[in-house]
Image: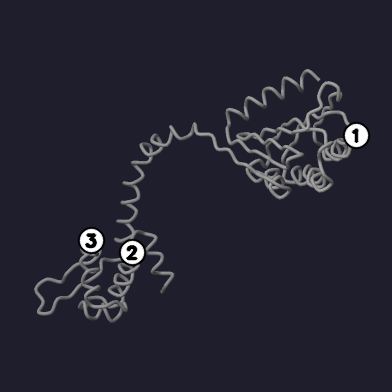
C-alpha cells in the first residue's frame, strides 16, 4: 500500500490525499467517517482532504442522500488529468530554458588540496569523458613525492581503460621516463620537448569543457569548468603539437 501511495504522490497528490483517494476507491460510495476509518486519518482531517480532492476533480459528492457520501473518480481519469497537467507545464519549458541562458556564462572553479585532493581532481569527469580525448602539457616530476608519482603512474592505465584517449606534450627528463613509457604502451600519443625549451613543474590539461591544473610541490589542483577556456587550451596544444 505504501508503494501505491507513493505512486499517487509522484503523480501530484500529497500523502494524505493519496490515502483518502485509495480508501475511497476501495470503499466505493462512502461517508467521510468510513473513509476516515479506512485511511487511518482523523475525521476532521478527512473532511478537509475530501474537499481538496473535490477541488481537484478527483472526488464527487453523491447528491440527494440523507447522509453525505462521496465517490472517487476512476484511476484512469486521475492519471489522464495528471498527464494533462504535465503537458500543460511542459509548454513553459522553452521560456524557462531561456531564463537560464544568462547563467551558462558563469565559470565554476574547484580547488583541491593534498594527495587525496589531487587524485580526485585527476579523475574529474572520468565518466563523462568516455570515448573522448584529454590533451595536456605534462610536467617534470622533480617536485613530485613518491606518493604523488604513484598516482601519476597509475592514472594513464585507469583513464585509457575507461576508453579515454590521451594526447600529451611533456618535457624530456629522467623523472618523466616511466610515465612516458607506460603511456606509450597504453597507446597514448606523446611528444617530448627538450628540457632546455620546456621545463614546467606544473601540468595543465583540457577535457571537452574543463581545464585541470596540477601543482606538484604545494600538492594543489584547480579545475576550471569552462568550455571556452578548454577550447582555447586545446587550440594552443594543437599548435604546439604540429610544431614539434
Count the marks: 3
Quarter occupied by the C terminus: top right
Q: Which residue is mark 3?
A: 57
The label number, if any, that marks residue 14 in the structure image: 2
Q: Image quarter for residue 47?
A: bottom left
- Alpha carbons under labels 3 and 2: distance apart: 15 Å
Horizontal and vertical percent for residue 45?
Answer: 24, 73
Q: Which residue is mark 1?
A: 174
Residue drawn at x 24%, y 60% is: 56
Q: Nearer the viewer, residue 138 or 4?
A: 138
- Alpha carbons under labels 2 and 1: distance apart: 66 Å
Tag 2 secondary structure: loop
Return the residue found at the far front.
218
First along the sequence among labels 3 and 1:
3
Residue drawn at x 58%, y 36% is: 225
First along the sequence among labels 2 and 1:
2
First along the sequence among labels 3 and 2:
2
| Nearer the camera: disc 2 or disc 1 | 1
The label number, if any, that marks residue 32 in the structure image: none
Amino acid at each position: 500500500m505504501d508503494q501505491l501511495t507513493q505512486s499517487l504522490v509522484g503523480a501530484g497528490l500529497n500523502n494524505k490525499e493519496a490515502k483518502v483517494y485509495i480508501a475511497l476507491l476501495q470503499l466505493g460510495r462512502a461517508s467521510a467517517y468510513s473513509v476516515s476509518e479506512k485511511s487511518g486519518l482523523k475525521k476532521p482531517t478527512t473532511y478537509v482532504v475530501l474537499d481538496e480532492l473535490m477541488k481537484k476533480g478527483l472526488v464527487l459528492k453523491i447528491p440527494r442522500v440523507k447522509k453525505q457520501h462521496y465517490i472517487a473518480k476512476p484511476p484512469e481519469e486521475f492519471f489522464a488529468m495528471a498527464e494533462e497537467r504535465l503537458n500543460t507545464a511542459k509548454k513553459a519549458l522553452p521560456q524557462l530554458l531561456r531564463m537560464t541562458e544568462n547563467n551558462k556564462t558563469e565559470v565554476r572553479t574547484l580547488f583541491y588540496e593534498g594527495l587525496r585532493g589531487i587524485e580526485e581532481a585527476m579523475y574529474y569527469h572520468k565518466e563523462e569523458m568516455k570515448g573522448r580525448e584529454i590533451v595536456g602539457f605534462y610536467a617534470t616530476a622533480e617536485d613530485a613525492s613518491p606518493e604523488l608519482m604513484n598516482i601519476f603512474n597509475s592514472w594513464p592505465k585507469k583513464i585509457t581503460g575507461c576508453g579515454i584517449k590521451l594526447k600529451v606534450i611533456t618535457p624530456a627528463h629522467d623523472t618523466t621516463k616511466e610515465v612516458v613509457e607506460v603511456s606509450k604502451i597504453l597507446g597514448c600519443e606523446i611528444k617530448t620537448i627538450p628540457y632546455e625549451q620546456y621545463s614546467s613543474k606544473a601540468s595543465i590539461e583540457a577535457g571537452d569543457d574543463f581545464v585541470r591544473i596540477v601543482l606538484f610541490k604545494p600538492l594543489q589542483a584547480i579545475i576550471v569548468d569552462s568550455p571556452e577556456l578548454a577550447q582555447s587550451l586545446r587550440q594552443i596544444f594543437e599548435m604546439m603539437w604540429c610544431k614539434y
